[in-house]
Image: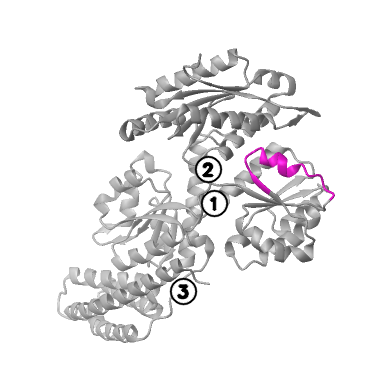
Amino acid sequence: MVSAASGDVSSRLAELRKRFAERATDDLKALEQRAQLLEGEGADGAVLADVCSRLHRLAGSAGTFGFPELGQAARSLENMLEARADDGSLQEASSLAVERILALRTMLESPPLPAQVTNDESAQGAVERPEGSHGVRVRVLIVPAGKTDPQWLDKALAAYGFDCQVRHETDPELIAVLAGELQTATVILCASVRIEGVIRARDASPSDQVRRLPVVCLSEDLSFGSRYRVAALGADGFFGRSPDLSELAERIEYLALERSTRVHGRVVLVEDDLELAEHYALVLRAAGVDVLWVNDPMQLMSELSSFQPDILLMDVQLGQYSGVTLARMVRFDPQWLSLPIIYLSSEDDPDSQLEALSRGADEFLMKPVSDSYLVRAVLIRCFRARQLSRLMNRDSLTGLLKHSLIKQEVEKELARCRRDGHAASAVMVDLDHFKKINDTYGHRCGDVVIKALANTLRNRLRETDMIGRYGGEEFLVVLPHCDTEAARRLFTEIAEAFGQLTFNCNQETFGVTLSAGVAAINDHSVGDDAVDAADQALYQRKRAGRNGVTVAGDE
């Protein structure tokens, strides 16, 4: 079924096709006149450049708007004229060029191919923005081996902030029962004996979004053969029947975040063809991508700084400017050394493509590019770019912001408080008796506890909240639009939930508590002062017996 949103996209794409046909008609008339000038003695090189430029633009855009033969013929004529100019026989080819341009006009008069509007749900952009600091509410659908299986896993994962639901239906019932459940699931967690039925139910869904749901398998058999069978079926994770909960939670969260990130991205599009730029922007926005179109290359650097894209999508030829030169210029700025640059061009010579790539770009998409291919290529690049950014800006153990970056977030929030007049809180969080955990169970176990707290914070805080690893077992959280009393209540709940987690190390089971100190960011003139106040409140909590929350100024 085509939604109202996709119907609107279809009508707007149809309008763009109509505008393209009108513009192309005018371009071909102008091309015919310009080509006739090539017949004269000593034809001006500027005339040839103009003819080739118009043909190049036509070759790159015609296929997108339903005229693939027109695009191919324009590219062929462009290549022929450039070759004749090189061997000195341009004047002889000019009359042939006029004939071919007349043939192009005939092709344009033919009905265009029907538009192919994707109905891929992952490309519709109507993606819910649920709770969680990572922007994802993790919903886990658990399919155990049978009704007699222990009922502890859903409760244990719920302590990490996941929404869990258990289904016991037998395989023949799964397809019908899961049809509705899968629509709201983020990750499927199932026993190995059920995995074939679960994946069959998932793959039978008409929804592309459901068919991409990640599946994590729990198995008693940890052999190579068992792992290979599960991988061949299409699972995304494999754990023993009694998994380490913190590792399982981390894997579930990673898969949920990866799946969510696929449908988001920020792209700067540099394209001088108005209709083509609007077409690309419309298709990408329908896929959930934020697109900023830049038609004046002189504005590119300032727009990059303000928009902060995941990737740069750019034509190789932009009027008087070269996309290759612009890519090299962008790389002058250290901030953009790692920015993925994708060329869009009708250039079909492999050597020219490689030369363009060697000047600073990462990928070459040849026009005309199908809408579905463009969307997939852009989303994959956006996801990889965010992964790289995450590696550069995040703590390697927890995936949280590094010390310097979370302190910057405090300063940014203080500036917003001054501008908008709202309240905000800084919270310093510390694991109680962490040194004892390291000394008793080892640093590897200590790392597991740290990651568990990071997972708990991510899944229980909002997307607008910022979390950083301040150092060791200490974390700093920024809560916009949250006064200190609301922060106290929130972190009291988090402390209680975290205290319910159990850890297994060296065949021993233990629990860990946390302490937190809260300070009002808006009560201070400098961000560092707010951090210091939260830190002092934390140590006041420690002196008062740990395992709880203290607000700066409490008696």
| Pointer 2 local density, CA inside 10 Å: few below 14, some 14–19, many at least 20 | many
Residue 370 to residue 440: above or below: below
Which residue is the site of mark 3? 116
Label whose residue precedes the other's in the sequence (1 or 2): 2
Q: Identify the amino acid type marked 1.
A: Ser
| Pointer 3 local density, CA inside 10 Å: few below 14, some 14–19, many at least 20 | few
Q: Does residue 186 show up? A: yes
Which residue is the site of mark 2? 134
Which residue is the site of mark 1? 260
Which of the numbered marks, if any, corresponds to residue 155?
Answer: none
Label whose residue precedes the other's in the sequence (2 or 3): 3
| Pointer 1 local density, CA inside 10 Å: few below 14, some 14–19, many at least 20 | many
**What residue span does the magenta drawing correspond to?**
148-164
Q: Identify the amino acid type marked 2.
A: His
Tag nearer the camera, 2 or 3 = 2
| Residues marked 1 and 3 touching at CB (< 8 Å) | no
